[in-house]
Amino acid sequence: MVAFGPGIVADQATFENPHQYAVGIPLVIVNGVVTIRDGEHTGELGGRAVRGHGRAVGGG
């Protein structure tokens, strides 16, 4: 579940600083675990990667 303000969501990432959370998304819940609260990561990890048959296998 994601709570967001549709009129205020904006990407803050740049090429120089790519690992930025978007603004306007104050709450993210994954599998019942609050992962983002007040726009900050809580350190909790409620999910896992889902890999399908299209994933590359091997050394690259």
Image (cartoon, rainbow, N blue to C red):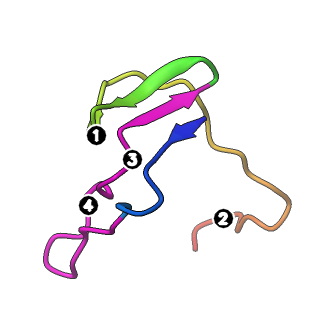
Q: Position of residue 2 (x, y in %)?
A: 54, 40
Mark 4 vs 3, N-terminal side: 4
Q: Are marks 1 and 4 in contact (CB under 8 Å)?
A: no
**Total tally of numbered discs in the picture:** 4
Q: Which residues are magenta?
A: 10-30
Q: Is residue 13 left or right of residue 58?
A: left
Mark 4 vs 2, N-terminal side: 4
Q: Nearer the viewer, residue 59 or 36?
A: 36
Q: Is residue 29 magenta?
A: yes
Q: At 52% from the left edge and 18% from the top edge, which residue is drawn?
A: 33
Q: At 40% from the left edge and 21% from the top edge, which residue is drawn?
A: 44
Q: Are marks 1 and 3 in contact (CB under 8 Å)?
A: yes
Q: Nearer the viewer, residue 52 or 40?
A: 40
Residue at mark 4? 19
Residue at mark 1? 39
- The local crowd at label 3, few if under 14, some if 14 to 19, many if 20 or more residues have their Cα within 10 Å, is many
- The local crowd at label 2, few if under 14, some if 14 to 19, many if 20 or more residues have their Cα within 10 Å, is few
Q: Position of residue 21 (x, y in %)?
A: 30, 54
Dominant secondary structure of the magenta stretch? loop
Residue at mark 3? 25
Q: Is residue 21 magenta?
A: yes
